[in-house]
Image: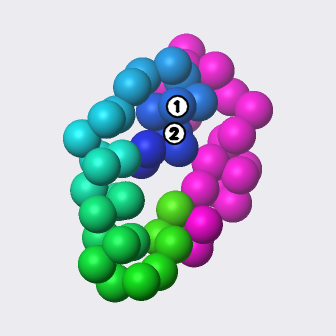
């Protein structure tokens, strides 16, 4: 969700902090391991209005 929000220009400082905290606590890079990203879902090039139309 953080990547999708960034794509349409919405800041998500709280979820970004939670992802970072969980990554530190679990010694993993959850942001890099993300499996469901706008790219993997084929929506990385869509604008906010195009996403609404889906």
Membership of 40 in magenta stretch: yes
**Which dot marks residue 4?**
2
Please name the residue shown 69% across and 60% down the image. 40
User: Which secondary structure, mark 2?
Assistant: helix
* Image position, residue 4 (x, y; %): 51, 39
* 28 left or right of 25 in image: right
| Residue under the point 64% across and 21% down | 47
Q: Is residue 31 above or below residue 48?
A: below
Q: Name the one closer to the observer, 52 or 22.
A: 22
Residue hosting label 1: 6
The x, y position of residue 9, in whole percent, is 51, 19
Residue placed most toward the observer, 11 or 8: 11
Q: Indicate the secondary structure of the residue bearing disc 1.
A: helix
For label 1, count other residues whose C-alpha is less than 10 Å away and answer few (under 14), some (14-19) or many (20+). few
Residue beneath the point at 47% across and 80% down: 28
Q: Quadrant of the C terminus?
A: top right
| Color scheme of the displayed model | rainbow
Q: Are marks 2 and 1 in contact (CB under 8 Å)?
A: yes
Residue drawn at (36%, 72%), measured in percent from left and top? 24
Q: Is residue 8 above or below residue 15?
A: above
Segment colored magenta: 32-54
Left or right side of 22 for 50: right
């Amino acid at each position: 969700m953080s990547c999708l929000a960034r794509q349409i220009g919405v800041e998500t400082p709280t979820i970004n902090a939670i992802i970072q905290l969980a990554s530190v606590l679990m010694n993993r890079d959850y942001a890099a391991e993300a499996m469901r990203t706008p790219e993997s879902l084929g929506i990385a090039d869509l604008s906010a209005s195009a996403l609404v139309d889906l």
